[in-house]
Every structure is written in structure tokens, then in C-alpha cells.
Amino acid sequence: MPRAAATESVFQSIADPTRRGILDLLKEGERPASELGAPFQMSQPALSQHLRILRDANLVSVRAKGRQRIYRLNPEPLQELYDWVTHYQEFWHDKLRALGAHLDTKARNNKRSR
Amino acid sequence: MPRAAATESVFQSIADPTRRGILDLLKEGERPASELGAPFQMSQPALSQHLRILRDANLVSVRAKGRQRIYRLNPEPLQELYDWVTHYQEFWHDKLRALGAHLDTKARNNKRSR
DNA sequence: TTGACACATAAGCAATCCCTTATATATTTC
DNA sequence: GAAATATATAAGGGATTGCTTATGTGTCAA
């Protein structure tokens, strides 16, 4: 089974707005390829290629239903992205706290110097 | 003030592993450009170009200190990424719960049929 | 002031990305 | 079986990416 380089592909997969749009759509439930393409103004092969990339990144799974391909979201690989960005969340919270403290100090000083 | 297309640039900026590495480094504190380049085997201009992209995306800020440029992390734009991926977090939690329930059911059925 | 240093920008280039049109494959319908 | 439908893959091309070497700019040190 050919396993794609997972880490790389998740960050790259979501770099494209069309692919993020597809994932957003799939959050609301599984859908055939044709419906996934509807919101985007591009040819059918173009969409099919985006779906291939999402498949390779293991972000979606497919099942056949007649001549349709039903796509379903597989969010697990996004965990890595979540983990990565979460490490920054604490940082920006710290920063907001620091800003708050700074403003407090300023307010105190203003009061005192008045 | 020239404002870059924020949304696009954050997702694109973090698509590159070198740039993620730079941001990770900056989490530990501000650093001059030279130190940021050390871990990556590439020329000085190559690094400088990555730093430019991060600046344009407003993910870092710079200040001059003699002939050095001191870079500092600015995590705010990552909030958008955090918001985006967070909407999936609940989904994969649901999925794990569903899997758990399924396994429970299976276990019950196995027990009953034994 | 002259040279070394830290960095940015310019120019060029191969690889990759994202689209297109053309074609193949499988399924359903007539 | 033949035509229509749903999708995938192939081939090609323009734009973008990420590097390289060459060069510019500002600062420090002798």
C-alpha cells in the first residue's frame, strides 16, 4: 500500500481554498463528487484532481454508489494541524494577557501622575 | 498602508516546512535572522525570502539592532487557522464517540450471542 | 575610510501547482 | 447493444514556488 508523506500533505492540502471549501462542505455530511463541485467554478476534471489530493492526504474516503462516488470527510489527519496551531494559542493568550497588564500599568501611572 | 490578503496568506505561509520551523523557533523568543537560518540547510537569501513571506503575512515583526534584524513572532494571524481547524475538532470527537458506541454495541451483541 | 559583516533584493531557473481539453472506464437507461 | 451519465486519468501549458548566484544597502570595527 503506497503511503503518502502524511505530515507534509495535510498542510499542503489545506493551502488551497477550493480544497478547504470541499472539506467545509463535507462537514455537513457525505456527498457525491458532482455536488462537491457545484459551488466552484471550474471544470469537472479540476475538481476531480482536488479530490485526488484530498484522498491521498487521507482527508476524505470514497465509496461507490452506482456510477456516483460518495465522498466522506475523514478529519483525523487534521489533528496534526490542530496540535501544531494549539501550541501557538497559549502564546497569543499570553500576549493578550501581557497587553492587558501593560494597559493596566499605564492606567495606574496615568492616574498617579495626574 | 498596503494590506496583504490575510486569509490566503496564512494558510499558504504555513504550507512550507521551513517557514513552520522558523515560527516554531520564534515561539521560544525573538531571534536575529542569522540564528533563524541556522537549522536549515539553505543559502542566506533563501531564508531571507522565507522571512519576507512571513512578514507579508504579518506572522512576524522585525526590529533593527545594529546590523542585525531581530524577528519576533506575531501569532495573531494564526487565530484564523485555529478557528478553522477547531470546527473539525468537534467532528473528530464525534467520530471517536461514535466508534466507541459502535464497539460497545458490538461487545454487547457478542456477549448476548454467546 | 576601508573592509568585514548582516541582511535584503534582483535575476534566473527547475520543479510544482492548478487549470484546461481530450479521452478512458464503469454504470445506468433506453 | 447503444447512448447518456458520473467520474477518473492523461497530456499540455501558464503561473507560482523555492531555490540558486550576484549584487545592493546599511552598520560596525580597525
Image: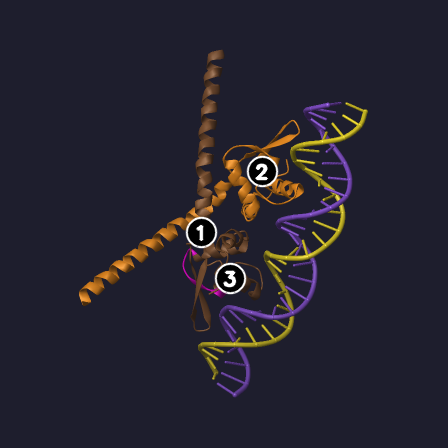
Chain colours: A brown, B orange, C yellow, D purple
**Mark 2–mark 3 distance (CA, rounded to whole Å):** 36 Å
**Mark 2–mark 1 distance (CA, rounded to whole Å):** 27 Å
Image coordinates of residue B83 in percent, x first then y, are 45, 44
Asked which quadrant contains residue B36, the reply is top right
Q: Are marks 2 and 1 in contact (CB under 8 Å)?
A: no
Q: Observer-nearest residue: A10 or B25?
A: B25
Horizontally, residue B103 falls left or right of residue A74, namely left
Q: Is residue A30 magenta?
A: yes
**Mark 3–mark 1 distance (CA, rounded to whole Å):** 16 Å
Q: Which mark is residue B36?
A: 2
Number of other residues with Cα within 10 Å of mark 3, as a class: few under 14, some 14 to 19, many 20 or more: many
**Is B24 drawn above or below residue A5 in the view shown?**
above
Q: Which residue is mark 1?
A: A78
Magenta residues, start to end: A27-34
Q: Are marks 3 and 1 on the same chain?
A: yes
Q: Which residue is mark 3?
A: A51
**Is B83 drawn above or below residue D10 in the view shown?**
above
Chain letter, disc 3 residue: A
Image coordinates of residue A22 in percent, x first then y, are 49, 57
Image coordinates of residue A17 in percent, x first then y, are 54, 53
Secondary structure under the numbered disc 3 in the rendered image: helix
